[in-house]
Amino acid sequence: MSLFLIAAFRADAQWQEGPFDTLYVPIIIEGGDTMTYGALDMVLVWGRMSADQRRAHREWTRLRNAVYVTYPYAKKAGFIINDVNSNLQGIVDANKRKKYLSQREKELKKEFTEPLTNLSVYQGKVLMKLINRETSNTCYELVKEYRGGFSARFWQTIAWIFGGSLKQDYDPRGADAEMERIVQEVARMYGHAS
């Protein structure tokens, strides 16, 4: 037993106080108890999505893909319509206006017929909304202005058969808020001013 006391005394005699003796740790007092406290790094926990969440994710992905495909066409349509309107202001003669519109129509058909016919019906609906966003006119109003009322009603009927409407408005703060967020994302990515 005396050997144990001598060993303990001897070990204590070798200990010297130094600058690294104390560890400062954060504490938290919970119900009168003082406990050490440490914050862990953020951890992402992935669970299985419910059926509603999977459906919403599929719909969002479909919309996002449709916007990515159609937004460049909508931007181009807005530019072309503004260009046509500015050129038509300088043409007073009705025959010259008709000739100019016919010439532009041929150019547009040559450039856009193939890519636009490859769009799905859903992408076409998204494109109509984006054209309304870019021009502040519905597709019905644009067709009526450039092709006449009969043509506008004809194409409205065709759109209706496929579950769409040329008269659909774009509501960035309401029904189309998600589409607007995606458009803003695309605009930032391509450096377009929206």
Image: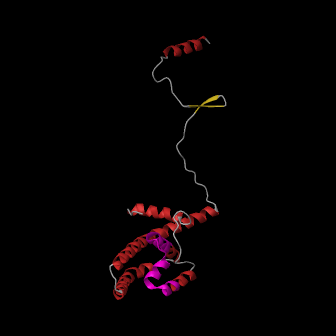
Q: Nearer the viewer, residue 81 or 74?
A: 81
Q: How many marks?
A: 0
For the stretch drawn in magenta, the main secondary structure is: helix
Way the structure is coloured: secondary structure
Q: Image quadrant of residue 91?
A: bottom left
Quarter of the rendering containing residue 93 = bottom left
Say if the magenta span includes residue 152.
yes
Instruction: Locate the C terminus and report the quarter of the image it occupies.
Output: bottom left
Q: Is residue 173 left or right of residue 92?
A: right
Which residue does the image show at 51% across and 28% down from the upper left? Answer: 24
User: Is residue 101 in view?
Assistant: yes
Q: Position of residue 131 (x, y in %)?
A: 46, 73
Name the foreground residue: 77 vs 71. 77
Specify the quadrant that holds the N terminus.
top right
Q: Could you tell me residue 163's position as x and y percent?
A: 57, 78
Question: What residue occupies the far bottom of the structure in this picture?
Answer: 95
Identify the residue at the far right of this view: 31
92 vs 129: above or below: below
Q: Nearer the viewer, residue 96 or 129?
A: 96
Q: Is residue 181 above or below residue 130?
A: above
Q: Does the magenta portion include 119? A: no
Q: Give, as a single range, the part of the protein colored magenta.
A: 126-153
Q: Does any portion of residue 118 appear in the rendered image?
A: no
Q: Where residue 157 appears, x then y in whole percent?
A: 55, 84
